[in-house]
Amino acid sequence: MGEIFPTEMVPVTEPYFLFFQNFIEAWPDNASVVLRSGDIDRFTCSQCGVCCTLPWRILIDRDYYERWYQHFDEHPSGKFKRPFVKLHLDSDVQYADIRRQAQSNRCIFLQENNQCFIHSEYGPSALSNVCRTYPRTSLRVAQKYGADYLLASCQTSPALISQNHDFFAYFETKETQRERADSQASPLEGAGFSKKVNLLWLGLCLDVLNLPQNTPLQNLRSLNFSLSYFSERNLAEIQETELIRLYREQRRISEIPLMVGPSQSDQKTALAWFFKLIEPSFTPILNYAQALYHAHLPWPELGDPELLLFNDFIKNYLLRKMITLPYGDLFQQKLSFFQAFFQLSLHLVMIQVLASYYAYRKGKPIELKDLTQAVNLVEGRYGQRRDWPEKHKINRISDLDAIEFMQIALSLDFGHHLLPVLEAQT
């Protein structure tokens, strides 16, 4: 590969495991490896304003708070009294939250025309770092791994998932991170893997997801073999040589074509979980899912063009999730390594049922818009909900249960050509 300097971006190529094996040989002791999604350079903000109306925190740092609080609080219009709310998190980065409009999730600075008051009056340089860079996000895990990517909670960014995923790797030190204008990173503790093992594990996941013998969801499901191996080990003690052996065995298992469809009982269990994950106010969606569960509607049977679209989209979604999946919840850091994979499998249940419902409602095959709309809803409404893992007790599940439940959730696979037979129930 030649000499690699700490800030030089290198295109990441397949096979990913081999790429990372070579890449880590040049790893400086004082640096992290950061993966940067090519989606960042393709993204263009539509200025829809939707992201300013959703039920999540709009975080600002201490410097921004001290610079702008009094200015907006004393604004002649009187519209922006007490504009920021301190969070008391003992963090200068996550120092305060921007206040919402009364009885609403709308940002206090969002005008009736869905334009930002700060952006309109003072320009983009006056925006907080989160508002200026969203949905661009910098994730940093335990000063050894990072990812620069787009949050799919933005209405525009999921459309990029239909494109093949390209990403780049570079080394980053604390000094070079501070030099970046968009480097407000979210620090996490990490799974316990060493620096190099962490990257090899990522390479293993990416290569398995790309295997053609089975659907992307079944490829992800096959990773339970490796997860079960990890559950019996201290993650911090796993060596690179173990990952090399595990990679060979995992590929051997994942390359075996599945000759039978997913378990009927497991699929029904996954559908039953969906009923608990979606709020009761989503009545038409719940009615549709229950009709599938009771076999009052036929199981979604995708035609060849649909299968190709569906599986390509899910694969590209998962490739993006793998490089951004922190070992701990990005927004609360409450999930373990194994719980994070289980939560991802639940999100995939929701994405599939939602996309299928959107297509059913129109009376048409599943289209790209159905898939992007489903991802946007799940990532925005649930993926960034701070109370979601606690509400569904995901953060209380044991390692072994998380692996078993992930297996059940991923049995729901509308991209599989072998369909289950669901008996009608009253």
Image: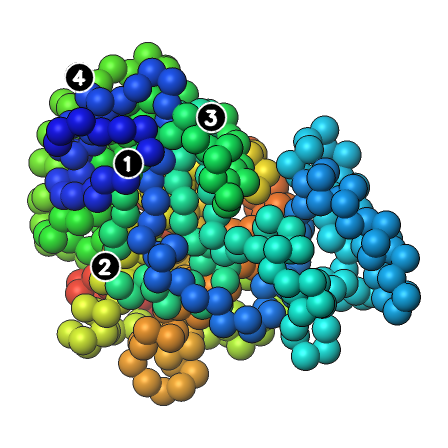
Residue at position x 43%, y 66% in the image:
44
Circles 1 and 2 in contact, beta carbons < 8 Å: no
Q: Position of residue 318 (x, y in %)?
A: 31, 51
Element type at marker 4?
Answer: helix
- Label 2 sits on what residue type? Asn
Badge count: 4
The tag earlier along the polypeptide, 3 or 1, is 1
Q: Few, some or many C-alpha atoms within 10 Å of disc 2 (few <14, some 14-19, many ≥20)?
A: some
Q: Which residue is mark 4?
A: 241
Residue at position x 60%, y 48% in the image:
129
The tag earlier along the polypeptide, 1 or 4, is 1
Q: Is residue 331 left or right of residue 378?
A: right
Inter-mark Cα distance, 1 to 2: 23 Å
- Label 3 sits on what residue type? Lys
Q: Few, some or many C-alpha atoms within 10 Å of disc 3 (few <14, some 14-19, many ≥20)?
A: few
The tag earlier along the polypeptide, 2 or 4, is 2
Residue 164: assigned label = 2
Residue at position x 65%, y 74% in the image:
114
Q: Which residue is mark 3?
A: 174
Q: Position of residue 412 (x, y in %)?
A: 32, 57
Element type at marker 2?
Answer: loop
Please say whether residue 396 is visible from this viewpoint: yes
Please say whether residue 33 is visible from this viewpoint: no
The tag earlier along the polypeptide, 1 or 2, is 1
Q: Which residue is mark 1?
A: 8
* Above or below, 267 relative to 240: below
**320 or 36: nearer the eye?**
36
Q: Position of residue 365 (x, y in %)?
A: 29, 81
* Above or below, 39 relative to 399: below
Element type at marker 3?
Answer: helix
